[in-house]
Image (cartoon, helix red, strand yellow):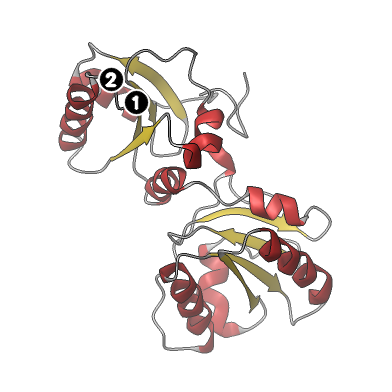
Amino acid sequence: MTIYNSVFGLLTGLLLLAATTAGAQVANDIAKQNKLGNAVFLVVTEGGANAAPLKDIAQKAKALYPHSAVLMMDKADPANAASVKRYGLSGAPMPMVLVVAQNGVVTEGFAKQDATPQKLVEGIPTPKQSEALLGFDQKKPVFVAMYKKSFTDKPAMIAECKKATDALKGKAVVVEVDLDDKAEAPFIALLNPAQPVKSTIVHVFNSKGDFSSKHALPVQTNTLVESAKKEVKECCPGGAKNCKK
């Protein structure tokens, strides 16, 4: 299940809690795994009930994706109250498993009946997608610039994006995606740029993670700023999980 609805099935949450309680230790353990370059499958239970089946699914996901770890968290433990609130788990069915990307952002959540090893692995974003999701988690608009190394217009487009970020008082993120980077293929497919791509293009998302608009040069800074601030009723970069086309 997905707790929050926004582009890419975003589940917001960064694991930056202080290590003062047993609950904070869970956050520290996740942070340690992230520092090692690992994603985390966090199995959340209520009093430890019915944990075994979901933990088994998480372990199988770990086998499919070696750069990952399986951790446990008890929702009923008062020490975990801050994490429960941060992830919006108060009314969530238990047990469930959260997918935590390598940069600490929570990207997916599955109840026991919906979780499969493959779904958990598919919930791990690419590195550049993680950057975008982190921006959404911080309530920032995101400019996703898609380019090829042969495109001579990339510097000018990135410059416009950075001007827009400055105009937004630094409250925006620029993510640069090389269209030839095989590691980013799932993210590129998600954004689904019109083929063939012959010049640098920018997909603009507002701070809620909703797709706003797509631009190529020439584009003015104020146009990018307006797009970043735009309220969107229906997102649609093409292929995003919760979009209505």
Q: Give the residue type at disc 2.
A: Phe
Q: Secondary structure at mark 2?
A: loop
Residue 147 image label = 1
Measured from the top left, where is residue 78 in percent x and y? 59, 83
User: For residue 172, what is the image quadrant?
Assistant: top left
Q: Residue at x 68, y 70 (%)?
A: 43
Query: Where 95 falls versus 116 (above or below)?
Result: below
What count of labels does the image hold? 2
Residue in view at x 63 percent, y 23 percent: 244
Asked if the residues shown at circle 2 and circle 1 are in contact, with their CB atoms under 8 angstroms apart, the answer is yes
Along the line of sight, which residue is nearer the eye, 149 or 162? 149
Tell me the SS state at disc 1: strand
- For residue 236, which quarter of the picture? top right
86 versus 162 height, above or below: below
Residue 133: percent from left, percent from top: 45, 46
Query: In this rendering, does residue 99 appear at all?
Result: yes
On residue 12, which mark appears?
A: none
Name the residue type under label 1: Tyr
Above or below for 88 versus 172: below
* Disc 2 target residue: 151
Question: Residue drawn at (33%, 15%), measured in percent from left and top?
Answer: 199
Q: Quadrant of the C terminus?
A: top right
Tell me the crowding category of disc 2: few under 14, some 14 to 19, or many 20 or more residues within 10 angstroms, Cα based: few
> Is 38 positioned to the left or the right of 45 in the image?
left
Residue closer to the observer: 63 or 33: 63
Q: Position of residue 63 (x, y in %)?
A: 70, 64
- Between the C-alphas of marks 2 and 1, the distance is 7 Å
As drawn, is 46 to the left or to the right of 84? right
Q: Is residue 243 left or right of residue 142?
A: right
Q: Residue at x 48, y 88 (%)?
A: 21
Image x and y of residue 96, in percent: 72, 64
Q: Nearer the viewer, residue 202 or 77?
A: 202
